[in-house]
């Protein structure tokens, strides 16, 4: 057993604190918007110039003119603000965004992140990823533990082009939650019905266990 994508997003939403300015990456991280705890008021920011993203739109609430940086349709909550992308990046580069929850293709045990391209495949560009990982106060990666071919996405050294070096603080996957530390990757939480042996076998590095099993 492992967490579903929805359960992964629910777990990632627990990283948010009241009053936070938050950036959610493209793909799986966008689901986090649907699971923000009721007692936590956060402001979701998009690089293209929106502060105050609401829940992921339904067919009834979709507005084709309202999109995030990944060109996905979004909603705007009450009090939302619209501004230029230059002002949006000033927020990011100025350290005013508390946390970014991003997807990834690889994360190394040093906290290096590769999440923007696979060599030989068509890519639109880096986007705001590089600015986010160096400008945001805390970076949490939300991803499947293994790639589609079963290879680990948590590795000793990234083989794909890097987005940033030593920028990841925490990794949440379908198998558990891990922190990047100076000693290595520390396992702090296992997903439901996942064993220590299962998550270790799916990882490309030795995990430090910080939980009782």
Image: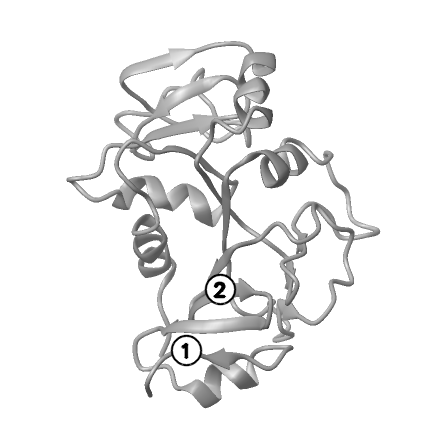
Q: Percent from the top left, x then y, of residue 31?
A: 37, 45
Image-based side of 44 in relation to 167, left or right = left
Which quadrant of the rendered structure holds the N terminus? Answer: bottom left
Q: Residue at x 26, y 42 (%)?
A: 36
Q: Residue at x 53, y 83 (%)?
A: 200
Q: What mark, if any, has residue 71 been given in the picture?
A: none
Res. 93 image quadrant? top right
Q: Residues within 10 Å of mark 2 (few under 14, many from 20)?
A: many
Among all residues in the image, which is located at the extreme left?
A: 39
Q: Is residue 28 visible?
A: yes
Q: Are marks 2 and 1 in contact (CB under 8 Å)?
A: yes
Residue corresponding to mark 2: 179
Image-based side of 142 in relation to 132, left or right = left
- In the image, residue 112 sits, relative to residue 66, either above or below, namely below
Q: Percent from the top left, x then y, of residue 45?
A: 44, 27
Of the two numbered discs 2 and 1 on the same chain, state the one appearing first in sequence.
2
- In the image, residue 192 sits, relative to residue 92, either above or below, namely below
Q: What mark, if any, has residue 210 been given in the picture?
A: 1
């Amino acid at each position: 057993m492992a967490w579903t994508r929805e359960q992964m997003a629910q777990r990632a939403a627990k990283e948010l604190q009241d009053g936070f300015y938050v950036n959610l990456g493209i793909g799986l991280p966008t689901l986090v918007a649907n699971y923000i705890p009721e007692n936590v008021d956060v402001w979701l920011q998009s690089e293209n110039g929106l502060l105050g993203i609401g829940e992921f739109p339904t067919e009834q609430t979709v507005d084709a003119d309202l999109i995030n940086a990944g060109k996905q349709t979004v909603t705007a909550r009450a009090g939302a603000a619209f501004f230029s992308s230059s002002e949006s990046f000033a927020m990011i580069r100025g350290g005013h965004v508390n946390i970014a929850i991003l997807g990834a293709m690889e994360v190394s045990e040093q906290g290096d992140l590769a999440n923007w391209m696979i060599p030989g495949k068509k890519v639109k560009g880096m986007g705001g990823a590089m600015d986010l990982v160096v400008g945001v106060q805390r970076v949490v990666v939300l991803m499947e533990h293994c790639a589609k071919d079963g290879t680990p996405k948590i590795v000793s050294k990234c083989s794909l082009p890097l987005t940033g070096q030593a920028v990841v603080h925490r990794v949440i996957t379908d198998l558990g939650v891990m922190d990047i530390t100076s000693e290595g990757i520390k396992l702090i939480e296992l997903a439901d019905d996942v064993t220590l042996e299962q998550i270790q076998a799916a990882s490309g590095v030795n995990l430090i266990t910080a939980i009782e099993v």
